[in-house]
Image (cartoon, rainbow, N blue to C red):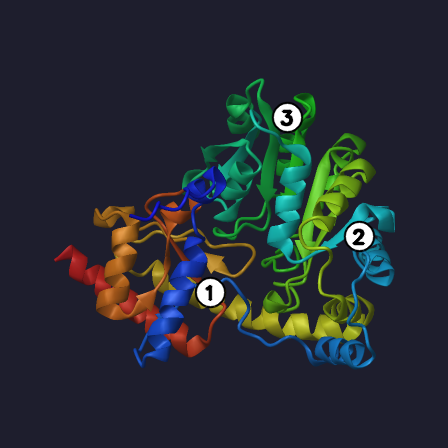
């Protein structure tokens, strides 16, 4: 009789797979099998990467940029990232404070690994991006979720943060614009939250991945610019995936105080070595060829804004659904709690009966909601929301 294999590590046993990727993969598999599935689960732009970015990458590949790069990124790209923060926010950072990683997700993970240890607590406002709690657990720390639902516009308040802090609290995670809600904090709101973090000497992980995807006059705020105290304890995560439709390129950035940036680079050196070398030259073109990049972003944002308004207008017509109009990203997060179903059951039945794929709110720490991505065609939006209305009507019978 053979001996059974030893158990997997505690890390592997305790980690949860990404539900957003799982739903998106299931929808794509059904589509590939010929099913008429309308996919609202995608967390990526439905536009292609702009041509000038692809051309720069191809030129780098053909030019032999195929070797290892410096762990924190090629020097011209780190300088371009530093220049961007100065131009857009007036934030002065040295290239040595910039780390280029294999994706924004990896940047978040580096930030948490560099600052948090076993026994520490990390405050995560919900609804949250699905990976935050799992990253905290992988670092051996404990995620502490604070629900900020549609009653507060999905925005954490200073009072809520203050009430959640304990002697073990090490970090608070902020995400504006938000995935999944599309909520955007004003500068004044962030100043009040950051004041609490500074008072308690907390690190701030500011996930600003969707910073350029804002609507209705909303303006992104770089948390590090709020005060010198904020700058000294904030790790900014951003990247190229959402703004430049480069999700598959896996390129993220991290800007941090020198000691933290150095630690993140050293951790990355033992995990991934570096972000793909020739891809970094595409990212450099995105930052350097500003007019071409701005034109591509404008085209994308015009479509997103039109779809956002259409989808919201149709959703609020459906009896039983309420929905806050998002100010950023490319998601809406409607409340479906009136139907009396757990949101995971709601989504499963919606996919089974009407072939509409959506991600359940509890995946983001907020039971009773759906995340609907409008990073899809106008035709799919119109068909999908009609099917959703039909499904909701069937539940009311």
Query: Which residue is located at x 22 percent, y 64 percent?
Result: 391
Q: Nearer the viewer, residue 355 or 32?
A: 32
**Cα distance in 3D space between marks 3 and 1:** 35 Å
Res 167 visible: yes
Of labels 1 and 2, the one closer to you: 1
Q: Which mark is residue 388?
A: none
- 294 horizontally vs 6: left or right: right
Are the residues at dot 1 and dot 2 in contact (C-beta closer than 8 Å)?
A: no
Query: Which residue is located at x 58 percent, y 37 percent?
Result: 139
Residue occupying the far front of the picture: 1
Image x and y of residue 19, in percent: 41, 54
Q: Residues within 10 Å of mark 1 (few under 14, many from 20)?
A: many
Q: Secondary structure at mark 3?
A: helix
Query: Which residue is located at x 30 percent, y 78 percent?
Result: 35
Residue identified by numbered label 2: 85
**Cα distance in 3D space between marks 2 and 3:** 25 Å
Considering the image in quadrants, where does the C terminus appear?
bottom left
């Amino acid at each position: 009789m053979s001996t059974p294999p030893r158990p997997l590590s505690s890390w592997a046993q305790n980690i949860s797979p990404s539900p957003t990727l799982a739903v998106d993969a299931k929808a794509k598999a059904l589509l590939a099998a010929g099913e008429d599935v309308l996919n609202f689960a995608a967390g990526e732009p439905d536009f292609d990467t702009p041509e000038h970015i692809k051309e720069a990458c191809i030129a780098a590949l053909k030019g032999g940029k195929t070797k290892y790069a410096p762990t924190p990124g090629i020097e011209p790209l780190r300088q371009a990232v530093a220049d961007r923060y100065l131009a857009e926010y007036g934030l002065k950072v040295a290239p040595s404070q910039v780390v280029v990683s294999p994706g924004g997700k990896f940047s978040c993970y580096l930030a948490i690994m560099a600052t948090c240890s076993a026994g520490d607590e990390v405050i995560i406002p919900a609804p949250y991006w699905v990976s935050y709690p799992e990253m905290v657990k992988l670092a051996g720390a404990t995620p502490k979720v604070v629900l900020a639902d549609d009653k507060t516009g999905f925005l954490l308040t200073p009072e809520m943060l203050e009430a959640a802090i304990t002697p073990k609290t090490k970090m608070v995670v902020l995400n504006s614009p938000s995935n999944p809600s599309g909520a955007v904090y004003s500068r004044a709101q962030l100043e009040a939250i950051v004041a609490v973090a500074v008072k308690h000497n907390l690190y701030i992980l500011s996930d600003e991945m969707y910073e350029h995807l804002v609507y209705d006059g909303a303006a992104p705020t770089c948390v590090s610019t709020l005060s010198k105290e904020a700058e000294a304890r904030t790790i900014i995560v951003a990247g190229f995936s959402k703004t430049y439709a480069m999700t598959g390129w896996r390129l993220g950035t991290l800007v941090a105080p020198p000691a933290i940036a150095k630690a993140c680079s050293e951790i990355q050196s033992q995990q991934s070595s570096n972000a793909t070398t020739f891809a970094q030259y595409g990212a450099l073109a995105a930052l350097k060829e500003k007019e071409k990049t701005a034109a591509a972003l404008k085209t994308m944002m015009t479509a997103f804004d039109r779809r956002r308004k259409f989808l919201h207008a149709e959703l609020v017509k459906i009896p039983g659904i309420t929905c806050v109009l998002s100010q950023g990203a490319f998601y809406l997060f409607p409340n479906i709690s009136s139907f009396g179903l757990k949101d995971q059951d709601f989504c499963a039945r919606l996919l089974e009966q009407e072939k509409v794929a959506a991600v359940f709110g509890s995946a983001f720490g907020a039971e009773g909601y759906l995340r609907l991505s409008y990073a899809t065609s106008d035709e799919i939006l119109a068909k999908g929301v009609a099917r959703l209305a039909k499904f909701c009507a069937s539940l009311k019978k």
